[in-house]
Image: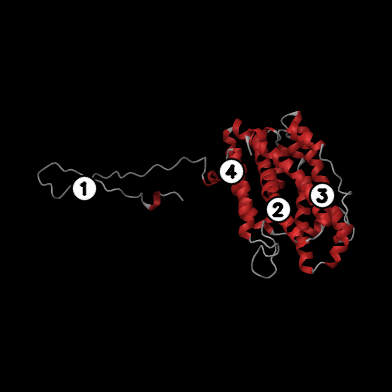
Amino acid sequence: MSVQENELNDPKALYRRWEDSQWSPFDIDLTADQEQWTQMNPDDQRLIYWVLASLMVAEERITTKFSGLVGAYGTEEEATFLATQQVDEARHMQFYARFQDDVVAAPATVSEHVDRARRELSPAFRRIFDVALVEAHERLVTEPGDLAAKVRFVTLYHLILEATLGLTTFKFVMEYLERERLLAGFAEGYSKIHHDETRHIGYGVWFLRESVRDHPELAEAVRETMRELLPSVAESLAPPDRGSGSSGDALGFSAVEIRKFALGGLTRRLDFIGVPLSTLLLDAREPPAEPVRSTEPPAPDPRASGRACVSSRRASSPPPASRRA
């Protein structure tokens, strides 16, 4: 992404794009999906249900844990765009609930769908959405003027959830659906959701780049959030297998392929924001360790008898106790 492209993602421009991108979750034709679902083999059904469970829980969380960011707006333009994002998230949740109602299961409330979906998800997924996101949102609600809290929330929400998890899931699930020629209605709705999410990610990258540029110390808030959650993100990206021992077997891609794609996108965004991935390994709060120098006098040269000693030091590594991990 260039600087010029980032300027196209300021809140005012994003709001105009939102106005031109309206769609209804109730206009998607799911008739063919209803017929195909009953003919799908159980493995495909289980995989699609796992994907749907992940998306359902994610959308419920990011719909209900977003108002704190709206309340922490910096300008009226930002507040206007953020209000549209909350509408988008609710629309996405309605589409997944409708697919559950009309194609997968008997009609139920959104909360019933979410409760059923939670049973399909990993502890890592729950750590991200039920713990980290909830805590970050609660802090932002309590302290809407805390810019560091806002940076942490946007890093988690837009950079981790929507960009790293969301875009990666979309790429590989859509390739699977197209390859297997499955669920055209679901694919249409999912593609419209993806279009909305790219707009949201544009805001997140814009906000983080602006914040780090104006307040360089906030780069550490980005790093801390990434360090804390990247292990859970990597675990959450692995779909269920089909007994082959490969965590990506169900979708037809290896775990290595999936994580490589996710890491590539994350690396590009962090570079553009101004917090390169390589800096996550450094702790900005601690200065580099000074080399350890011996305080002992040099040993005399035994060959120099009755003359001034000419000492020489051998280069050596610091003792193990002085090395930093």
Residue ID for mark 1: 299
The alpha-carbon separation of the residues under discs 3 and 2 comes to: 19 Å
Kindly indicate whether the residue at mark 3 contacts the one at mark 4 (C-beta within 8 angstroms). no
Q: Which of 19 and 314 lies nearest the eye of the viewer? A: 19
Residue drawn at x 62%, y 47% is 266
- As drawn, the residue found furthest toward the bottom would be 243
Q: Which of 163 and 297 lies nearest the eye of the viewer? A: 163
* Amino acid type at mark 3: Met
* Amino acid type at mark 2: Lys
Q: Quick check: 8 left or right of 321? A: right
- As drawn, the residue found furthest toward the left would be 306
Q: Determine whether the residue tagged by mark 2 lies in a helix, strand or loop.
A: helix
Q: Position of residue 195 (x, y in %)?
A: 76, 45
Q: Earlier in the sequence, mark 3 or mark 2?
A: 3
Using the rendered image of the protein, determine whether residue 119 is visible from the camera's viewpoint. no
Above or below: residue 263 compared with residue 250: above
The alpha-carbon separation of the residues under discs 4 and 1 comes to: 47 Å
* Front of the two marks 4 and 1: 4
Residue ID for mark 3: 93
Residue drawn at x 70%, y 39% is 202
Residue ID for mark 4: 223
Q: Quadrant of residue 248?
A: bottom right
Q: Would you call the spot at circle 3 few (<14 residues within 10 Å), some (14-19), or many (20 or more)? A: many
Residue ID for mark 2: 171
Using the rendered image of the protein, determine whether residue 55 is visible from the camera's viewpoint. yes
Residue drawn at x 57%, y 35% is 217
